[in-house]
Image (cartoon, grey):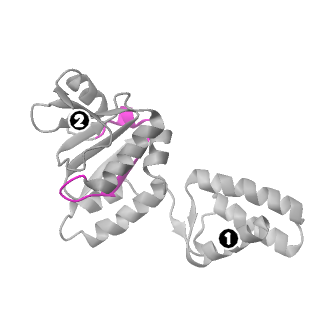
Amino acid sequence: MGASTEGAEPDLAVLLTPDGDLAPAWLSGKSVTPLPVGERLGAVLADRVTAGCRSTGATHLRYAPLGADPVVTTRAIPADAATHPSTLLWTPDHQGALLFPAPGHVLLAGTKPFMTAAVPEGTDEARARFTRYARKQAARHPELLTAAATYAPTHRAWSNAAEVPPDTATAHHLHLLREFTNGTLLAPAFAHAWWQTRRTAQSNGERARGPLEELFTHVFLLLED
């Protein structure tokens, strides 16, 4: 592992705003989620970054402690689990970055391949989990609620039909079920439309939980059989 200041300022200018936030221009076309963290990066987050790097072919990371004269280090993955804030880690090709502003949370962002590998549960699910974490830790880290509100899930997880907005793929799933139950939609057409709608729901980040999830799982198993 060797240290160098070469390339530090151009990279930071692309990835960060003058205030130290992830730059909106760089985030264009990428997704971002806050994730829980302690005083150090930790093995779990280091593994996430490693998975993202491997999915995009990155063999090294760049590193810069913030709030001081930036010293950029090129290091082989995996990411150093002992990394502490305030720090920015990023891939040399700018496909992924991790901003560790303070104990309590990080912001992980990147292209679709990077984030699919680094956040396999999906960005919306990761955001929902972070929101629950932020509420539990609010007394100790009140700033987490701000991060959770800034990066709220794009779609909520609905537990019953009355909660589902009409312009969603999940609402179309319910419409298909009603048509099939009423006998106005034949089984082959229902199955075809169900799978198409399921792909759209997954692409949109829509999630079901509770009784609605149980219903959709039952339909899924019946169609699989």
Residue 21 highlighted magenta (yes or no): no
The image's mark for residue 148 is: none
The structure residue drawn at horizontal position 28% and vertical position 72%, both measured from the top left corner, is 136
Secondary element at tag 2: strand
Mark 1: which amino acid? Phe
Above/below status of 23 relative to 181: above
64 up-or-down from 217: above or below: above
**Quadrant assignment, res 177:** bottom right
User: Start and end of the magenta stretch?
Assistant: 22-41
Give the amino acid at mark 2: Tyr
Please tell me which residue is depicted at 20% across the width and 64% down the height of the picture.
Answer: 141
x and y percentages locating residue 183 in the rendered image = 89, 72
Give residue 219's position: percent from left, percent from top. 73, 71
Q: How many marks overall?
A: 2
Residue 20, by quadrant, is top left
Single out the mark in the foreground, 2 or 1: 2
Identify the residue position indicated by label 1 in the image: 216
Q: Quadrant of the N terminus?
A: top left
Q: Is residue 183 left or right of residue 70?
A: right
Q: Is residue 164 visible?
A: yes
| Tag 2 and tag 1, C-beta contact below 8 Å | no
Q: Which residue is mark 2?
A: 63
**Residue placed farthest to the top in the image?**
6
Q: Could you say where residue 59 lies in the image, as x and y percent from the top left?
A: 37, 32
- The local secondary structure at tag 1 comes to helix
CA gap, disc 2 and disc 1? 44 Å
Q: Is residue 26 magenta?
A: yes
Residue 42 location in percent, x, y?
26, 55
Mark 2 and mark 1 lie on one chain; the one further toward the N terminus is 2
**Residue pictured at 32% horizontal, 52% vertical:** 45
